[in-house]
Amino acid sequence: SIDTIYDIIKDYRKDDSIFITKEHIQEWALQFGNDAAFVAREFAHIVRQVYLSKNEGYQYLEAVLEFLQNEYNEPDLELLLQKTCFLRLQPSGKSQHVLVDMLDEIVYAKLNKHICEYDSYRKVHFIYVDDVLASGKTVADNLISWIGQGSRLDELKSKNIDLKLFFMCRHQLGMELQ
């Protein structure tokens, strides 16, 4: 079980210089005393089903870009980026910033330009991307504040701008609150 868990999550937070080792996983499991083997086995079963590697995160974000190009009928990625703002409403260091940075890496690999190089263009598409929709509180707090700024609510109502939300995974509770 320890080997299985390690093989699945070994890339977790390595970019933050936090390196998961088999020893760390073993220490974590030992906190459950006599149930350590059972907890490790169950965790291995669960994590195998739900953990997304960083590579899978990049694949998901590639799919988001492709979806946006199709949704807005804009095959030219540069023209799409001129009209699109990837929101950074969460505090620095949170997953939203990491995901937008990953999107920036994808864009740079394709166009040799960073997303911020399109900041001067008028934006009509606003994209909120995050890793997990759990209770919905974070997204609700973020968007209530964002929508309340300036004339955004009126622009959304009149469809002069639009807002799309993308989550890598969601919890049923978050969907029920929508």
Image: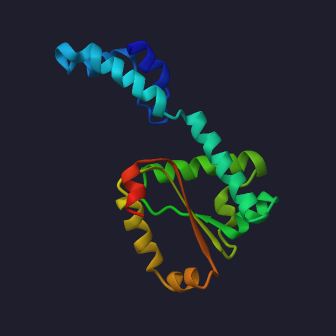
Residue 91 visible within the image: no
Which quadrant of the rendered structure holds the C terminus? bottom left
Residue closer to the observer: 159 or 16: 159
Residue 31 visible within the image: yes
Q: Is 131 left, or right, of 136 in this rendering?
A: right
Residue closer to the observer: 63 or 104: 63
Residue name at image x 28 percent, y 16 percent: 38
Q: Position of residue 8 (x, y in %)?
A: 48, 23
Q: Position of residue 6 (x, y in %)?
A: 44, 19
The quadrant holding residue 91 is bottom left
- Where 160 sits versus 73, above or below? below
- Where 20 sits versus 109, above or below? above
Q: Is 40 left, or right, of 50 in this rendering?
A: left
Residue name at image x 53 percent, y 33 percent: 53
Q: Residue furthest right?
A: 76
Q: Is 149 left, or right, of 61 in this rendering?
A: left
Which quadrant of the rendered structure holds the N terminus? top left
Residue name at image x 77 percent, y 52 percent: 111
Residue name at image x 74 percent, y 59 percent: 69
- Where 26 sits versus 80, above or below? above
Q: Position of residue 169 (x, y in %)?
A: 48, 46
Task: Give the total of numbered labels.
Answer: 0
Residue closer to the observer: 46 or 80: 46
Q: Position of residue 153 (x, y in %)?
A: 50, 82
- Where 7 sits versus 96, above or below? above
The quadrant holding residue 174 is bottom left
Give the colour scheme shown: rainbow
